[in-house]
Image (cartoon, rainbow, N blue to C red):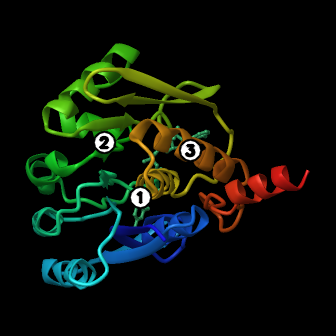
Amino acid sequence: MKMALTIAGSDSGGGAGIQADLKTFQELEVFGMSALTAVTAQNTLGVHGVYPMTAEVVIEQMKAIGEDMGTDAVKTGMLFNAEIIEAVSVNLTKYHWDNVVVDPVMIAKGGASLLQMEAISAMQKFLLPLAKVVTPNIPEAEVLTGMSIRTAEDKREAAKKLHALGVQNIVLKGGHDENPSESIDLLFDGKEFYTFTSKRIPTKNTHGTGCTFSAAITAELAKGADVYQAVIKAKDFIQAAIEDGIAIGQGHGPTNHGAYRKRIMEMVQS
Ligand SMILES: Nc1ncnc2c1ncn2[C@@H]1O[C@H](COP(=O)(O)OP(=O)(O)OP(=O)(O)O)[C@@H](O)[C@H]1O
Ligand SMILES: Cc1ncc(COP(=O)(O)O)c(N)n1
């Protein structure tokens, strides 16, 4: 069985973070492992507390996996500070983990900071050059590139800037776009641009979309897909998960990680 490791924060509400990643890995039939970077007290209304691990705790978890089990792919999510980013980067290199998806998580839906701003340069300098894929949303890409992104041309320019930082493939997500009918993600592999378009679903139950999408890419890479195929599958996975989003809590409910597999089963049975 193929294996995937998520290095990310815990979301007590279960819709984002390490919980979303492990659910996604399970649904896509890869064996999921985790290295926890922070505990958050969180629900559909927002983040009520952030309690980071020390870098040492993160290193110990990576070591435990690296020295025994290994992994076929790795994703990073909430990393919170520069010490954790540096520790993660050093250990990705140490264990020769090169199937790396970086989701540069910065701010939760409710506005809480999940990454200290002074850690941005560590992300640019140490982590991004190790990434096979980086999956920023538009505000994250603006922070990482220092440019404002409004037009399709801006998106291509931002993707090129991220490529120049050493990332092999950039998936610039369109969830935060103002397009009312479609959600368009842009992939740049250093040579070509590819767009992935889906119908925009009018819903408030989108908590954890970014985590789930990047975890699906990671699972597919672990199983041997190339980046293009992995993004196609992840887009189908997130589309089903948002369409069947779960209306629990009073704020942004989670997506439904089981929706994609349920649909496949229904198709097979019919
Ligand atoms: N309302 C929607 N309808 C269809 N697809 C969506 C919608 N919102 C987001 N997506 C898709 O979900 C994926 C995640 O995109 P998004 O830009 O929301 O990431 P994110 O902002 O990092 O997520 P998060 O809100 O978890 O931080 C992308 O593939 C995007 O196109
Ligand atoms: C631990 C953790 N990691 C990532 C997110 C981002 O997800 P969202 O923007 O949907 O809140 C989150 N809320 N919590």
Q: Earlier in the sequence, mark 1 or mark 2?
A: 2
Q: Earlier in the sequence, mark 2 or mark 3?
A: 2
Residue 115 in which image quadrant: bottom left
Q: Is residue 145 left or right of residue 152?
A: left
Circle 1 residues within 10 Å: few <14, some 14–19, many ≥20: many
Q: Amino acid at mark 1?
A: Ala
The residue that disc 1 covers is 222
Tag shown at residue 262 = none
Circle 3 residues within 10 Å: few <14, some 14–19, many ≥20: many
Spatial distance from mark 2 to mark 3, Cα to Cα?
Answer: 23 Å
- Taking the spot 53% from the left edge, 46% from the top edge, the residue there is 234
Ligand 1: does it lie within 8 Å of the C-beta at label 2?
Answer: yes
Q: Amino acid at mark 2?
A: Glu
Between 114 and 220, the one nearer to me in the picture: 220
Q: Amino acid at mark 3?
A: Lys
Q: Earlier in the sequence, mark 3 or mark 1?
A: 1
Viewer-side label of 1, 2:
1
**x%, y% of residue 238?**
59, 48
Tag shown at residue 140 = 2
Q: Secondary structure at mark 2?
A: helix
Q: Secondary structure at mark 3?
A: helix
**x%, y% of residue 80?**
24, 65
The residue that disc 3 covers is 233
- Taking the spot 21% from the left edge, 82% from the top edge, the residue there is 67
**x%, y% of residue 22?**
49, 71
